[in-house]
Image (cartoon, rainbow, N blue to C red):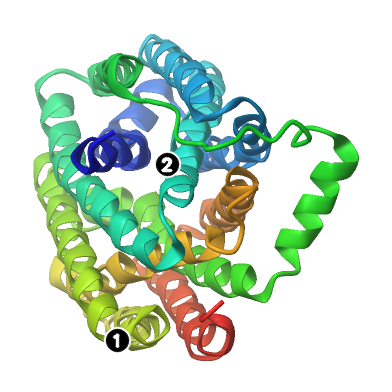
Amino acid sequence: MSSRLIVLTLTLLLGLQPMTTDLYLPALPGLVQDLGASMAQAQLTLTALLLAFGLSQLVWGPLSDRFGRRPILLIGLLAYALAAVGSALSQTMDQLILWRTVQGAAMGAGVMCARAIVRDLYAPARGANVMSQGLSGLGLIACVAAPLGGLVTAWFNWHAALLVLAVFGTLTLALLSWSFQESIPHHNPHALQPARLLANWWMILRNPTFLAYSALSTASYGGLFTFLASSSFVFIQLLGYSTTQYGLFMFTNSLIYLIGTFLCRRMIKRWGVPRSVMLAALLSLGGGCGMALLALSNWHSGWAVMLPMGAFILGHGIHQPCGQSGAVGPFPQVAGTASALNGFMMMLAAFAMGQWLGRHMDGTVFPLAYGLCFWGTLVALSAWTLVRRYGHG
């Protein structure tokens, strides 16, 4: 496969996540009203998806080490497209939560395999650069997802917005079935043996490099998820913006993230991965604490949210390529399993945060601000202690 095809493959697979989460966010307040749902149920459409996404990777990872990335990708993408249709046709909140859970589990196959493919084909240092290119593509998809979701919701309804995901999944499945070749050099015939699987998990979880970069990627994603789960209610219901305006805010964040992934490649080339991460942590900490301080100062406006969030997102564009590739780097023989554990940790943090938000969202900006401050602080601590010490692998 050419390098361009590999980057395109990574873009589409990694892009499943922002498409699945960002595109329906502008529709969330209207969906809640249409189905007569509670705030906790609304959060569950996102947190259940992400919990299934994280848990499924623990299954998809060893399966892909055993049978290869290609069959797992094709099965996962087919299930994703079917679950998207089921979500769009849902008539009750229980049906929607069920189909979103199935969709999250299917999405896990694509995103997990994307991380593993990078390790299959590249050494860790080069892998961080290639991952940043794939995540740049993710940024482009994220730029489109929320504005598209806002427009489709405004023109039609939330059913149509969710149906867009079925189209995206089907097109991705068609492209990969036509062009993607198996990337794993050798199948691992022992990957599914219970004793070997537990031994692999233990080997990975006690590796300090894996823990350092997983802590970094988990904390950074926790901050992003806090914004994703609460921002539509803050901007649309609290601050009075339209769904289209909210989509433009999300576009701005995605554009900043895209800039961060380009900046990541330049920083890695000049300073290496650990130092780049430590410098970017200043953005994460400044953004998180800045939003909390503005909220406490009663500056409740779109700019008081967007400016500090922009700083955090810029750092996120640096932390994710480094964190995801760094976590998988030490494990070329079990890259799928390592990728799965890294993804599971990120989604477990997101699920816990979603549960907290479901109980604490009170119609103010404070839950978002306090949550981002918490995760920004954890990003900085992870970068300045764990990655500084163990990030060289």
Classify mark 1: helix, strand or loop. Answer: helix
Alpha-carbon neighbours of circle 2 within 10 Å: few (<14), some, or many (≥20)? many
Along the line of sight, the residue nearer the viewer: 256 or 239: 256
Classify mark 2: helix, strand or loop. Answer: helix
Image location of residue 117, percent across then percent down: 44, 42
Q: Residue at the location (59% across, 43% down)?
A: 336
Whether residue 38 is visible? no
In which image quadrant can residue 147 be found? top left
Q: Residue at the location (62% across, 25% down)?
A: 67
Marker disc for residue 339: none
Image location of residue 31, percent across then percent down: 34, 28
In which image quadrant can residue 155 be found? top left
In which image quadrant can residue 102 be found? top right
Image location of residue 354, percent across then percent down: 53, 52
Horizontally, residue 348 falls left or right of residue 139, namely right
Mark 1: amino acid: Trp
Question: Where 103 sits versus 303, above or below?
Answer: above
Q: Indicate the quadrant containing the N terminus: top left, top right, bottom left or bottom right.
A: top left
Marker disc for residue 271: 1
Q: Which residue is mark 2?
A: 114
